[in-house]
Image (cartoon, rainbow, N blue to C red):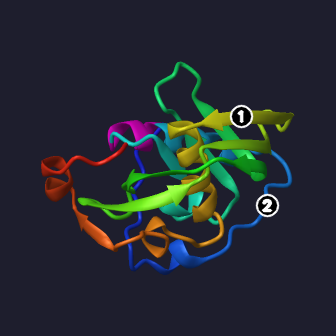
Amino acid sequence: MAIRNIRVDGDDVLRKKCKPVEKMTERLSELIDDMFETMYDANGVGLAAPQVGVLRRIVVIDVMDGNPLTLINPEIVEADGEQTGAEGCLSLPGLQGDVTRPNHVVCKALDRDMNPITVEGEELLARAICHELDHLDGILYKDLAIDGLYKVEEADEEDTEE
């Protein structure tokens, strides 16, 4: 496993639409391992393949609930409710923005073994799924931020929803 470089805002790869994964290969399996290691090293809760320069529909998520997720070719099939809160992104270090997302989502995907799975998430997990899936279509949370972005230090001084 290896820690990969996280691409930051301004890198063209973050604005491109990712291609579906047709079959699991040793190289893609290694990518998934590297994505988890990179995400944990950066203290993130999610990471999408384009954030490490790979244009494939793969995301990893771990909201520290004991259930780290690998989602391949993920698609949100149901969304309801609403939550607004601060979001950050490993590709926009030191910044946050308030974003409104569904409070509950159902996501269909393939797992690491290319078996179909359904993941249901609420609150932080729902937010993370939406955020990471946006990356697969070249969308950054700053595109959805209600009042633009602010430095994380400013967020710490305010009462923000998380």
- Foreground: disc 2 or disc 1: 1
Whether residue 82 is visible to the viewer of this picture, yes or no, is: yes
* Tag 2 near tag 1, CB within 8 Å: no
Q: Residue at x 17, y 48 (%)?
A: 156
Q: Main secondary structure of the magenta part?
A: helix
For residue 155, above or below residue 35: below
> Percent x, y for residue 132?
57, 54
User: Is disc 1 placed on a helix, strand or loop?
Assistant: strand
In the depicted view, which residue is nearer to us: 50 or 100? 100
Disc 1 residue type (three-letter) = Glu
In the depicted view, which residue is nearer to us: 37 or 154? 154
Magenta region: 37-42
Q: Quadrant of residue 113?
A: top right
Query: Residue 38 magenta-drawn?
Result: yes
Query: Residue 107 magenta-drawn?
Result: no
For the residues labelled 2 and 1, the Cα–Cα distance comes to 21 Å
Which residue position is annotated with label 2? 20
Q: Residues within 10 Å of mark 1 (few under 14, many from 20)?
A: some
Whether residue 52 is visible to the viewer of this picture, yes or no, is: no
Q: Residue at x 69, y 44 (%)?
A: 105
The outermost residue toward the top is 66
Q: Which label sits on residue 120?
A: 1
Q: Which sits earlier in the primary sequence, circle 2 or circle 1? A: 2
User: Is disc 2 placed on a helix, strand or loop?
Assistant: loop
Q: Is 108 situated left or right of 155 in this image?
A: right
